Image (cartoon, helix red, strand yellow):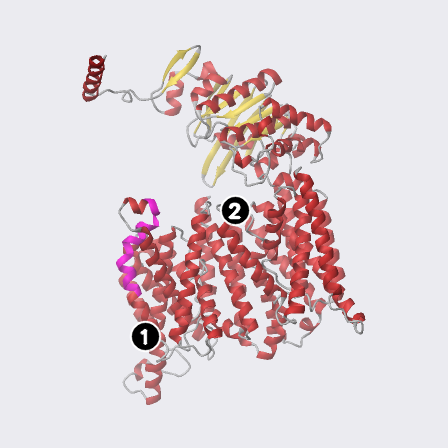
Amino acid sequence: MLRMTNNKLLLILTAGAIGAVALYMLYDLNPAIYFYQLPSRTKRVVAIVIVGVAIAVSTVIFQTIVKNRILTPSIMGLDSVYVFIQTSMIFFGGASSAIVLNSKANYFVSMLLLVIFTLFVFRYLFRFTKNNVFLLLLIGIILGTLFGNLATFMQMMISPEDFLILQNSLFGSFSAVDESLLGITGVIVLLCVLFVLRDFNSLDVMSLGRDHAMNLGVDYDRKVSQLLIVIAILVSAATALVGPMMFLGLLVVNIAHELFSTYRHFYLIIGSVLISVITLVLGQMTIQFMFDGGVELSVIINLVGGVYFIYLMLRRSKV
Amino acid sequence: MIKVRDIAKSYGEKKVVDDVSLSIEKGKITSLIGPNGAGKSTVISMVTRLLDKDSGEVLIEGDNIFTQPNNALAKRISILKQTNHLELKITVRELVSFGRYPYSKGRLKDEDHRIIDEAIEYMELGELEDRHIDELSGGQRQRAYIAMTIVQDTEYIFLDEPLNNLDMKHSVQIMQILRRLVREKGKTIIIVIHDINFASCYSDNIIALKNGRVAVSGTKHEVIKKSILEEIYEMEINIQCIFGHNICIYFDDQAGDVTEDDAQEYAQTVAHEQLRA
Amino acid sequence: MIGKLFRLDVLIVLLFLLSVLSMFVGVVELHPRDIFSLSEDQQSILLNSRLPRTVSIIIAGASLAVCGLIMQQLTRNKFVSPTTAGTMDWAQLGILIGLVFFPGVSMLGRLAFASILAVVGTLLFMQIINRIKFKDIIFVPLIGLMLGGVISSISTFIALRTNMLQAISGWMHGSFSTLVAGKYEILYISIPLFILALLYANQFTVAGMGEDFSKNLGLNYQRVLYIGLFITAVITALVVVSVGMLPFLGLIVPNVVSVFRGDHLRSTIFLTAVLGAVFVMICDVIGRVVIYPYEISVGLTIAIIGGFVFLFLIFRRAGANA
C-alpha cells in the first residue's frame, strides 16, 4: 500500500522533472535564434542534472551517517573555502593570470583543494572528535569562517574591477558554466553514484545506527569513511562546476523526506535527485526569464532554502 | 561456547576493563551483574566486536571473532544494545525485516518473509506490525527489537540492559520470552542486568563484575550468596528463599521503621473503624 | 601562573597600559614624551581620532563580552554568543534594510533598524532552541550558526539587488579606524545597558536554570528573559552599527574567564568586561602595526585569533568529555 504510493510519487516526480526541463527548453523560443538558444539551454540543463545528482546523493548519504535531517555537507564551510580559493587566485595572480582565465585549470585546482579540505576535516578531525559529528561540523564551520574572513580581507584589498570579476565566481550560477567541464564532472559524479548504488541496501541498515548496523554484519566504520570520501568528491565537483549552493541539499532532501516518508534509500535518493532537478530548473527559469539574469541562482536557492530551514526548525517539535 | 581471554580496555589512564576472562555456556541464560561502572556494557560491546579491545581475544567455538568477516559473524551472534531512540519512519515489520539482512542483503525471499511472519507471531506483534516504532510503548518497542534478533537467527544473543525503562509487568514478560527462546529454540542468551533478583530468578549462570574485573562467576546458586553479594555491592544484603527462588533483600533495616507517632495514628484509625462498624 | 595573575586589578592595570599604547600607535607619529608639547595637528589627532578610538575599543570590547556572558547564562550553553546565535547577522540585515528603504538614514536610525531585527532574531533563536529536545552543547550553536547563514544569505540577496555588496562586506569586518569624534559617541548608549545588566546579574543566573526552577524561586522568568535578550540584542546592534562585526568575542572571553574563575555571573561580569576590552585592544593594536602603514581591520584579527581560541576551547571540552 505504502509502496504503491511511493512508486506513484516517483513517477509523478519524474514526469514533473521532464516537464520542467521541456518547459525550460521551449519557453519563449525564438525561431530566428533557436540554434543559439537550444545549445545554451541544453548545456545548462546538463549542468543542472549533474549538480542536482551530486548534491542530492551526497546530502542523503551524509544525513544517514550523521542521523540528522538539518545538517548537510555544505554547511561545514565548504562555501567559504571555495570563495577563499577563488579570491586567492585573483589576489595573488591578478585577474588576468592563467589560473583565473583558464577555466579548466581553475576547476581542477579548486576541486582538488576542496577535496583536500573536506577530507582533512572528515578524516583527520574524526580521530580527534571521536566520531562526534556535531563537533566535527562545528569545527568545519569555524575553519570555514576563518577562510571566509581571510577572503573578505583580500577582497577589500583588490581593485573594484578585479572585485567585479571575482563576484561572478562567488555565487553559484549555471549561466557561465564552461561546457568543456561538463563531461569530466559528469564522469566523476557518475562514478561516485555507481559506487553508492552498488550497495545501497546497506545504507538502509546504516540508518539504524552504528550498533545495529554492525550487529547486522555491515562493516560500519569502513563504510562510513568510504562514503565520506565520496561525499567530499561529489560536493567539491558540484561546487567547482557552478559555485556554492549552500542550502540546496537541505531543501531538496527534506522535501523528499516529507513526500516519501520512508527510510528507504531507493526512494530517498531518486526522489531527492528529481526534486533537485525540478528546483534548479524552476530556479533557473525564474532568474533567466523573470529577473533577466540580474540575480544569481545560488542566491535564490539560498533564500528559499534558508526560509524553508527556519520553517522546518519552527515547525518540528523535536530535531 | 564463547571463550573470552584477558580482554582489556582503557580510556586514557583509566582501565575500564582489566583483563577479563570468562566463558559462556551454550543453551543457557548468563547474566552479567555488578555495580555501576563495573564495565559490564564495555565487556559486552567488546565481546560482540562493537568496540575495539586493547588486548585479549574472544573465541566463538574456537574462531577468533576479530578476524571473522563481519557478515559471517552476524549469522552467529547478535547484540541488542540499550534501545537508543530511532528517529526513522519505520514500521515494526520493516524493523524486524532488517534482521534478515545478513542473509538476504536487503532482497527478501519467500523464505525470509516466512521467518519474519513467524517471529512477529512469536513476539505477539501481529496487531502492531504496520505501526511506526516511534508510536509504540517502551515494552512494545523492546519486543520489536527482540523480534529482529530472533529473525537474525543466531546461536548467541546478547542483550545490554533489556529491562531498562520497563515496568515490572513488561520486564517479566521480556524475561519469560528469553527463557522460552532458550527452552524452545535452544538459543544461548547473555544479558547485562541491574536487578539482581531478575538475574537470580531467570538466569542459569551469573557473572559478577566489579571495577573492571570478574569478581565471581558460576551458576546462580553459587553466586547469589550473602557473603559474595555483600562484597560486590558493599552493602548489607539478605537472601531469602521464596517459592524456590533466592531473593535478595537489600533495603536497610530502617526502611520499614515505624515511629511512635505512626503507631499511635494507626491505633486511632483502627479504633475509629471499629467504632463505625 | 596565569591563573594567579587573572585578577581584576591586574587586568585593569593591563588595560590602562594598553590604552596608553593605543593612544600612541598610528600613522601619524606621536610620542608620549611629546605629550606636553603637542603641535595643533597632533593635538587634534589625539583628541579627535586616537582618544575616541581607544574609548570605543573599551566600550565595544567590554559590552560585547558581557553580552556573550548573559546569553550563555540564559541558554545554559557555553557556546552561545551574538555570533553563534546569529544576532550579528540580524543586526547587519537591519542596517541594510534601513539603508535600502531610507537612503541616508542617520546613525540612530540605522541603530533602530539593527536593534529591532537583532531582538526579533534572538527571540526566534530562543524559540527554536526551546523547541528542540536535543539540547546538545554543540548542536545548539550549530543551529544558531546556520540560522545566521540564512540571514546573511538574505542580506546578500538584497545587497546584490541594490548594488551594495562591497558595502556590506565592509561591515563584515569591524574596524575602529572610522570612529572619530562625532561618530563614536553612539557607543555610550551601551553604558546604561551595562548597568542594567549588572542589576539583573543574579536574576540571569537563576533564569538560566530554567523556567520551572525560576518560578520555584519566585522569579518572573519571562520578564528576566526578555530583559536579557533586549540588552544583548541592542548592544550587539550598537557595535555592529558603529564598529561592524566582531566575531567570537562574546564567545571566547566569557569562556576564558570561566576556565580560570568559574561561573557565578555576579563575580565574573567585571572580569569579563575588562578582559573583553583588553582582548579587543590587543587585536586592534596588532592590526595597526602588522602591515604598517596600512591597517588590518580589527574584525579580521579578532576572527582569526578568536577562531583559533574557539577551536582550542572546543577541543578542550571534547577532551574533558572523553
Q: Is residue B203 above or below residue B98?
A: above
Residue placed most toward the observer, A30 or B27? A30
Label 2 lies in what chain?
A
Decide whether residue C206 is among the magenta residues.
Answer: yes
Assess disc 1: are there few (<14), some (14-19) or many (≥20) residues with their C-alpha within 10 Å of its C-alpha.
Answer: some
Disc number placed over residue A132 in the picture, else none: 2
**Residue located farthest toward the top when viewing the structure as drawn:** B244
Q: Are marks 2 and 1 in contact (CB under 8 Å)?
A: no
Mark 1, residue position: C20
Which segment is the magenta one?
A: C193-212
Q: Residue C1: image x %, image y %?
A: 33, 56
Local secondary structure at mark 1:
helix
> Which amino acid type is marked by label 1?
Val
The main secondary structure of the magenta stretch is helix
Disc number placed over residue B14 in the picture, else none: none
Q: Residue B216: image x %, image y %?
A: 46, 21
Residue at (70% x, 43% y) in the render: A7
Residue placed most toward the observer, B15 or C273? C273
- C83 left or right of A130? left
Residue at (48% x, 71% y) in the render: C96
Q: Does the image show residue B126? A: yes
Residue at (27% x, 85% y) in the render: C36
